[in-house]
Image (cartoon, rainbow, N blue to C red):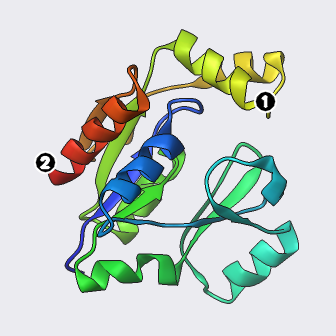
């Protein structure tokens, strides 16, 4: 692999999808890996492929995923072909999970982790605006939001507290760093 794999992590509402969309639009050579998620497509958010649990399991059993993990009652997978641009020198962004980092690092030891963060009040406001969770669900998410990551993984921190454009600039600086 000649490209670099960037795994973007952070709590719900930190703005990962917004920043990754903006960064990939600003830098066409940057590939944003599309995830497969056991969530209905109408749930919104990032561009993803929504599948049933049975379809996900069949694809997992067939070896179709380079990476996969479970989080928040859902299953997530990165199809093998979404990481193919690494072989041609492109950098690839993956919206990952803090809980899956040790497994991802075992598969891709040279990965770079970018942690997107924002203050709790900003996270709560963003989660409420997207309208996918109840007030109690948001409180639960914020209570379990931890920035702890496995030891031995280098992390670049990006604070997303200003405008989306400022956050995108910070993310691009981290990638180009």
**Residue 40: mark in rendering:** none
Please tell me which residue lies in front, 21 or 100.
Answer: 21
Is residue 64 shown above or below 78? below
* Distance Cα–Cα, label 1 vs label 2: 35 Å
Q: Is residue 87 left or right of residue 161?
A: left
Say few, some or many: other residues with alpha carbon within 10 Å of mark 1 (under 14 / 14 to 19 / 20 or more).
Answer: few
Question: Where does the image place residue 96, in percent across and percent down from the top left?
Answer: 50, 52
Return the residue at label 1: 131
- Quadrant of the image containing the N terminus: bottom left
Question: Where does the image place residue 6, in percent across and percent down from the top left?
Answer: 33, 57
Is residue 165 shown above or below 86? above
Residue displayed at 52% across by 48% down:
97
Question: Where does the image place residue 13, in percent across and percent down from the top left?
Answer: 58, 30
Residue displayed at 28% across by 85% down:
87
SS at badge 1: loop
Where residue 138 sits, quadrant-wise, is top right
Return the residue at label 2: 177
Question: Where does the image place residue 58, in percent across and percent down from the top left?
Answer: 78, 83
Return the disc, 1 or 2, that comes first in the chain's sequence: 1
Is residue 17 shown above or below 49? above
Q: Is residue 26 left or right of residue 128?
A: left
Residue displayed at 49% across by 53% down:
95
Q: Is residue 121 left or right of residue 9?
A: right
**Residue 86 in view in this figure:** yes
Q: Residue furthest top?
A: 121
SS at badge 2: loop
């Amino acid at each position: 692999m000649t490209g670099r794999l960037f795994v973007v992590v952070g709590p719900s509402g930190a703005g990962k999808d917004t920043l990754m969309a903006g960064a990939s639009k600003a830098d066409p050579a940057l590939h944003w890996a599309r995830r497969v998620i056991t969530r209905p497509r109408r749930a919104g958010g990032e561009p993803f492929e929504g599948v049933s649990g049975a379809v996900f399991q069949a694809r997992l059993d067939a070896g179709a995923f380079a990476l996969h993990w479970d989080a928040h009652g859902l299953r997530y997978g990165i199809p093998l072909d979404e990481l193919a641009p690494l072989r041609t020198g492109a950098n690839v962004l993956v919206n990952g999970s803090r809980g899956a980092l040790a497994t991802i690092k075992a598969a891709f030891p040279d990965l770079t982790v970018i942690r997107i963060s924002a203050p709790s009040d900003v996270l709560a406001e963003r989660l409420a605006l997207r309208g996918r969770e109840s007030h109690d669900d948001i409180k639960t998410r914020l209570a379990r939001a931890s920035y702890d990551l496995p030891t031995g993984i280098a992390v670049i921190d990006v604070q997303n507290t200003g405008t989306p454009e400022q956050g995108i600039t910070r993310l691009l600086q981290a990638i180009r760093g």
